Every structure is written in C-alpha cells, then in structure tokens.
C-alpha cells in the first residue's frame, strides 16, 4: 500500500484562515486555490509534522510501502502552475530569503502595492537563472528530507514523486 500524501493532507488540513499568513494565493480558471508557501518555516514545520505522523502511524506496518506524492500547483510541494512555472511566490518572505541566500537584490520597493508583479517582471528579465535554480533547490531540499525521513524509519519505504499539471482545474469545453 502506497499512501497518497494528497488524501492525508486533505483530511488533516488546518482551517483555511490559519494558512493565510503562510500561503501564496493565485487565481486559476476562476478558482482560488490555496498554495502553501513551501519555503516559509511554519509551512515546512507543518509539512514535516504530517510526514512524521504518517511514519508514526504506518511505519511498522508491513503492508505500507511508502508515500506516493502527486505534485502540482494545488498539492505541492512544488512551484508550478498551469502555463507558467514562475507564477507564484513573489511574497515578501520568499523574496527576502532569495535575496539573502542567492545574493541578488530585487530592486522593488517593499511597500509598493504592485511589488508582486514588479518582482516577477524584474526577476524573469534580470535573474531568471538564479531564481530558477534557487526555487528548484528549495523543492529538492523538501523532497530529499522526505525521502531521508522515510529511509531512516524503514529502508524499504518508497518515496515516489509524480509531477503533474492539474488538468482537473481546467473547466470543460
């Protein structure tokens, strides 16, 4: 039995209001999905608690083979969206962390009401390679942590990533 992290997260998901300080919101096909800001420490701690809880609940069960992790813009942890892999995560926390870790100063006023779209424009025009690498490294850190946590609990446990565009978010024609 491979456990789908999606179903566990949907069952155990905290109330929507508690996620707002730690999320990136975007509109997709008229819907407003919540997309956790995977680099925010509180979101990361919550994710790690979910993984640890799964291991505690099922780690000794012979029938449990690991975690099947479908990743897309709704299920994460991932930074992809329909049509634009750079659409999300221009919030103040993420940009400050990127500036600190990558050594790139994003010259957009932190008080500007249009700062999110201006950051998007500036980063893609001036630092796309560093921005891409940094974002990929952040997701890789999460995936490696999950894999290592499973292997530490039981070496035969699998961690399967299934990257997928969320075609179910596209309305029927």
Image (tube, helix red, strand yellow):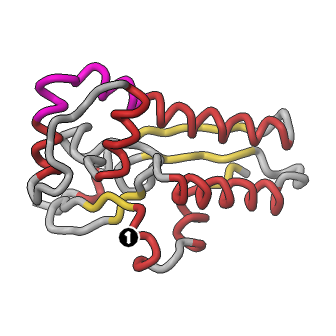
Residue 12 in the magenta stretch? The answer is no
Does 165 appear above or below 171? above
| Residue at figure coordinates x 21%, y 45% from the top left | 87
Q: Residues within 10 Å of mark 1 (few under 14, many from 20)?
A: some
Using residue 157 as the reference point, say whether residue 75 is left or right of it: left
Q: Position of residue 11 (x, y in %)?
A: 57, 73
Q: Position of residue 4 (x, y in %)?
A: 60, 55
- Which residue is rendered at x = 23% and y = 59% of the image? 26
**Residue, x 90% and y 53% (percent of image)?**
60
- Along the line of sight, the residue nearer the viewer: 116 or 56: 116
Residue at 38% over, 26% down: 102
Q: Which residues are magenta?
A: 122-136
Q: Position of residue 17 (x, y in %)?
A: 41, 79
User: Is the residue 80 above or below the residue 93 in the image?
Assistant: above
Q: Is residue 137 left or right of residue 79?
A: right
Total numbered labels: 1
Label 1: which residue? 20
Is 57 left or right of 166, judged from the image as shown? right
**110 to the left or right of 154:** left
Q: Position of residue 166 (x, y in %)?
A: 32, 51
For the C terminus, the quadrant is bottom left
Q: Quadrant of residue 111?
A: bottom left
SS assignment for the magenta stretch, majority? helix
């Amino acid at each position: 039995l491979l456990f789908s992290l999606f179903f566990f997260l949907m069952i155990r998901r905290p109330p929507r209001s508690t996620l707002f300080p730690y999320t990136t919101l975007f509109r997709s096909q008229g819907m407003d999905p919540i997309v956790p800001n995977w680099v925010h420490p509180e979101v990361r701690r919550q994710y790690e608690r979910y993984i640890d809880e799964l291991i505690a609940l099922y780690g000794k069960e012979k029938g449990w083979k690991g975690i099947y992790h479908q990743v897309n813009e709704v299920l994460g942890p991932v930074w992809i969206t329909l049509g634009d892999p750079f659409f999300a995560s221009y919030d103040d926390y993420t940009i400050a962390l990127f500036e600190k870790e990558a050594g790139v100063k994003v010259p957009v006023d932190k008080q500007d009401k249009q700062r999110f779209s201006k950051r998007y424009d500036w980063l893609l025009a001036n630092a796309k390679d560093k921005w891409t690498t940094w974002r990929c490294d952040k997701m890789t850190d999460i995936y490696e942590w999950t894999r290592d946590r499973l292997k530490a609990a039981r070496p035969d446990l699998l961690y399967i990533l299934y990257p997928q565009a969320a075609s179910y978010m596209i309305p029927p024609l």
